[in-house]
Image: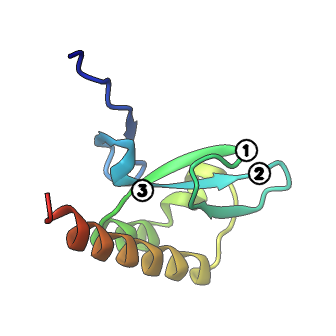
């Protein structure tokens, strides 16, 4: 059998390449609205952040997404991102250990 290619993306906070499934996509649409892309298929400019609470907190401290998207994001958005990443990290640890 042929091995499948794993899509890799770059984490905007750490600068490291990681498999796409281990990252969260943040998207900015044409109206400059920035949101968490849970499906990974929303249209717009995307940036990726690792599913790691420490990395999400580092993004909040450095306001990295403000710089990436050239917009002013509120602390509420970063808090929502941290909560979402925390949830995804917990699910990943819970379900990936079964393999």
Q: Residues within 10 Å of mark 2 (few under 14, many from 20)?
A: few
Give me the residue at 32% from left, 41% from top: 19
Among numbered discs 3 and 2, the one appearing first in the sequence: 2
Residue 55 is situated, as x and y percent measured from the top left of the image, at: 32, 65
Give me the residue at 38% from left, 70% from top: 88
Label 3: which residue? 49
Residue 8 is situated, as x and y percent measured from the top left of the image, at: 36, 34
Query: Which sits in the foreground, 73 or 21?
Result: 21
Q: Give residue 33's quadrant in the image.
A: bottom right
Label 1: which residue? 43
Left or right: 62, with 37 as reference point: left
Give above or below for 99 relative to 82: above
Query: Which sits in the foreground, 48 or 39?
Result: 39
Judged by depth in the image, the label closer to the viewer, 1 or 2, is: 1
Label 1, label 2: how far apart the Cα atoms are: 7 Å
Secondary element type, mark 3 = strand
Label 2: which residue? 29
Q: Residues within 10 Å of mark 3 (few under 14, many from 20)?
A: many
Label 3, label 2: how far apart the Cα atoms are: 17 Å
């Amino acid at each position: 059998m042929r091995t499948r290619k794993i899509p890799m993306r770059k984490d905007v906070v750490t600068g490291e390449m990681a498999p796409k499934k281990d990252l969260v996509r943040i998207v900015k649409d044409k109206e400059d609205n920035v949101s968490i892309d849970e499906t990974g298929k929303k249209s717009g400019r995307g940036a990726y952040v690792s599913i790691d609470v420490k990395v999400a907190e580092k993004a909040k401290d450095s306001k990295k997404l403000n710089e990436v998207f050239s917009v002013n994001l509120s602390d509420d958005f970063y808090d929502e991102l941290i909560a979402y990443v925390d949830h995804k990290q917990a699910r990943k640890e819970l379900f990936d250990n079964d393999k």
